[in-house]
């Protein structure tokens, strides 16, 4: 590290030199750190390569799940969803007790009861969670994917945002194989209700249960709307919407 003398004081990087200012004094230093080539070949960095490989795999697994859920995620997510999913997928990957270090997989970890439990109850929008919004009991039939809520009082058993006049419910079942990335997603019809004190029972059954390898994810989405002159509009770019994994089998 050396001080910079002269009339022109610059900050930033020029070729392999980095110019910066600290406590009012300008300095220059040569860019340091270990090169990518050395990390990729040096035996001293075996653990680093293993960690990098598993880190990338966990990130890709989160992306696979988001992509498989398509527009449901686009309608109910928070700004930190990618990083939160990365953490969850890393936990699940760690439950792979079969593969060698550096090659552990989410698909194997998710095949364990503990792996399924990590994702069970996951909310894609941390600012609007299922348990924080729906105050009524519900049931899930994993044979049909049906979600039912009996005698729901939307004005009392839903924590709705200011300005909301209606709330919608939709269930879905996703079959996803993290190894092949093959997925199938089937939805129920949407049940749209006014927010009032009239008890209403809802039954949400997907068109069919998708088949295939991997796991089945049972989803529930809750969306809020404001009706103006007979037209319903999503509230504040759908930031109050809920999307939750109810169960995995």
Image (tube, rainbow, N blue to C red):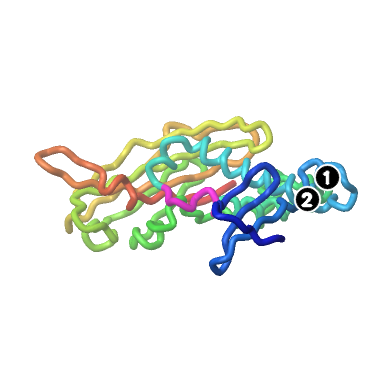
232 vs 249, nearest the viewer? 232
Q: Nearer the viewer, residue 6 or 98?
A: 6
Can residue 111 be seen here? The reply is no
On whether residue 82 falls in the magenta region, the answer is: yes
Which quadrant would the N terminus be assigned to in this image? bottom right
At which x and y percent is residue 69?
A: 48, 38
Residue labelled with disc 1: 38
Picture quadrant where residue 132 is located = bottom left
Segment tinted magenta in the rendering: 77-84
- SS for dot 2: loop
Disc 2/disc 1 C-alpha distance (Å): 7 Å
Q: Is residue 230 above or below residue 201?
A: above
Lateral position of residue 41 relative to residue 4, left or right: right
Q: Quadrant of residue 117?
A: bottom right
Residue visible at 34% across and 59% down? 133
Q: Nearer the viewer, residue 249 or 33?
A: 33
Image-based side of 174 in relation to 151, left or right? right
SS class of the residue under badge 1? helix
């Amino acid at each position: 590290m050396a001080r910079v003398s002269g009339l022109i004081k610059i900050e930033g990087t020029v070729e392999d030199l980095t110019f910066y200012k600290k406590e009012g004094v300008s300095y220059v230093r040569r860019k340091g750190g270990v090169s990518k080539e050395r990390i990729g070949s040096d035996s001293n960095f075996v653990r680093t390569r293993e960690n990098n490989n598993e880190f990338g795999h966990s990130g890709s697994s989160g992306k696979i799940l988001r992509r498989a859920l398509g527009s449901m995620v686009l309608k109910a997510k928070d700004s930190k969803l990618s990083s939160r999913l990365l953490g969850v997928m890393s936990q699940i990957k760690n439950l792979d007790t079969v593969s060698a270090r550096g090659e552990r997989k989410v698909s194997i970890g998710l095949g364990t009861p503990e792996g399924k439990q990590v994702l069970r109850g996951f909310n894609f929008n941390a600012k609007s969670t299922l348990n924080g919004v729906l105050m009524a009991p519900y049931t899930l039939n994993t044979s049909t994917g049906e979600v039912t809520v009996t005698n729901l009082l939307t004005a009392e058993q839903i924590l709705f945002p200011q300005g909301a006049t209606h709330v919608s419910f939709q269930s879905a079942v996703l079959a996803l194989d993290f190894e092949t990335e093959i997925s199938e997603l089937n939805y129920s019809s949407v049940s749209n209700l006014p927010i009032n004190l009239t008890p209403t029972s809802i039954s949400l059954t997907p068109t069919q249960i998708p088949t295939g390898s991997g796991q089945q994810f049972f989803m529930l989405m809750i969306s809020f709307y404001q009706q103006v002159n007979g037209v319903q509009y999503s509230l504040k770019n759908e930031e109050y919407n809920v999307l939750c994994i109810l169960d995995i089998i």
